[in-house]
Amino acid sequence: MASEHTRRIAVVGGGIAGLAAAHRLMELSRERQRERQQPMQLTLLDAGRRLGGAIGTERTDGFVIEAGPDSFISEKPWGIKLCERIGFTPRLVRTRDENRRTYVVHNGRLHSLPDGFLLLAPTQFWPLVVTRLFTWPGKLRMAMDLLLPRGPQRSDESLGSFVSRRLGRQALERVAQPLVGGIYTADPDDLSLAATMPRFLEMERKSRSVIWAMWTAQRRAPAAARAMSGARWSLFVSVDDGMQSLVDALAQRLPEGAVRLGSAVSSLRREQTWKLTTSQGDTVEADAVVLATPAHQSARFVADLDPRLADELRGIPYASSATVSLAYRNDHIPGRLDGFGFVVPLVEARSIVACTYSSMKYPGRAPEGHALVRCFVGGAMQQNLFEQDDTAMVESVRRELRELLHITSEPLLRRIHRHAQAMPQYRVGHLERMARIDTSLAQNPGLAVAGNAYRGVGIPDCIHSGELAAELVFARLFPG
């Protein structure tokens, strides 16, 4: 039972953003109590039967199968820093650098992505010259970026517009769209450049040419560029036995009894305190609330409290996607799975967005002599494929693997994980929407939002979002 001096904070949502918020609140509380006795009571409510949200790991017969994210980027520091604070870094593993290759499907065949091609643009001359991924007119059109003037000054534009304008349609359709699609499952003609890849917008403003800006940056600071993710880490890192272990490590650091699973919030209202009602009819009182749920769910919670905020949250669209994991014996795969996997441009009209060779990318994902691959289905541009039943989805994925990798054998195991309405779409104008959301939140003191809908979709972004929300409500309750 909390005393009258105890501050109560509720976190709604037990995904990585909610867990990061809850953990940061406990860190702040411990720091505060060293200075003065002002206790805090934390409650984390989640509708599911387990914590982690989209993150989940199955370990079976030596295979490590990820339901959602299989790694996080080390270039953004918040994931690594959290792991350091909880003593989790010994569990992190690098990618297998000897397999660092990515392929792109073109005319039904896999073509290696040219060395030095960074998301939108090439940074090395010779690999671009010799690749068969682009025609000569397409290569020359990319090179035109070196001569083109700056575009009109604007606060935002779509990624598709930017790439087409600077580098041409082939750069967009054959590389930028599939690579960015693998991150955001989004239509590049809708995707906000300012909200997702602002550095490219800044490159044009400062250097005029995107290619020249990237070449210059590499020549001036190659060591700094290599060190961006730290000497120990590759660009992407994972957990030795799967991402669920990071979720479990955070959950173990929360106070006993703080987590309430199977507690879906049905309403939120503000009286003298915040009152959250769960689907079981229980009422949780709190002095501050962090909503770490998808924006469309958070919109329902605040609809009566602040209709304008609810409209803004509801205005963030979402896409659905699925992962299909298949396991094989190595001798059932013609040749060798070479690289980290491949991406599939939309213009190829295939049934998958991308395929990761999980057992080639990270150690310990498959037993000796076996391989694990994971294919991605759906997204904003192929929502109809997400609607397939499980049998049809597996068969469509197997057909693609048969045509692209010549794998004809029955898989040893198959797993489908569906993520309905889970990937927010950062459309043009997203940052302006975020400014309006921030304004509305400022008018509701003690309320904060966190998650992948706001300022980044990756795990480090979600961690940062949760920690910022925690710091905001904590500072409100414990000023000074």
Image (cartoon, grey):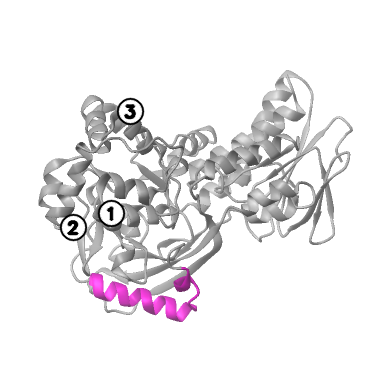
Q: Position of residue 176 (x, y in %)?
A: 31, 52
Compute the Cα span from label 3 to label 2: 30 Å
> Which numbered disc, 3 or 1, marks the residue that appears first in the sequence?
1
Q: What span is colored magenta in the figure? A: 383-405
Residue 296 lies in quadrant: bottom right
56 sits left or right of 117 in the view = right
Compute the Cα span from label 1 to label 2: 9 Å
Q: Position of residue 16 (x, y in %)?
A: 57, 47
Q: Residue at x 60, y 51 (%)?
A: 15
Magenta stretch secondary structure, dominant = helix
Q: Residue at x 43, y 39 (%)?
A: 90
Residue labelled with disc 2: 133
Query: Label 1's element?
Result: helix
Instruction: Indicate whether residue 386 is drawn in magenta.
Output: yes
Q: Which of the pair 141/107 is nearer the observer? A: 141
Bin the neighbour count of mark 2 within 10 Å (Cα to Cα): few under 14, some 14-19, many 20 and up: many
351 sits left or right of 140 in the view = right
Residue 35's disc number:
none
Kindly identify the amino acid type of the residue bearing the numbered disc 2.
Answer: Leu
What residue occupies the far front of the structure in this picture? 152
Residue 371 visible (yes or no): no
Residue 289 visible (yes or no): yes
Bin the neighbour count of mark 1 within 10 Å (Cα to Cα): few under 14, some 14-19, many 20 and up: many
- Residue 156 vertical position relative to residue 472 in the rendered view, above or below: below
Query: Label 2's element?
Result: loop
Query: Label 3's element?
Result: helix
Say if mark 3 contacts mark 2, CB within 8 Å: no
> Which numbered disc, 1 or 2, marks the residue that appears first in the sequence?
2
Residue labelled with disc 3: 206
Residue labelled with disc 1: 175
Kindly identify the amino acid type of the residue bearing the numbered disc 3.
Answer: Lys
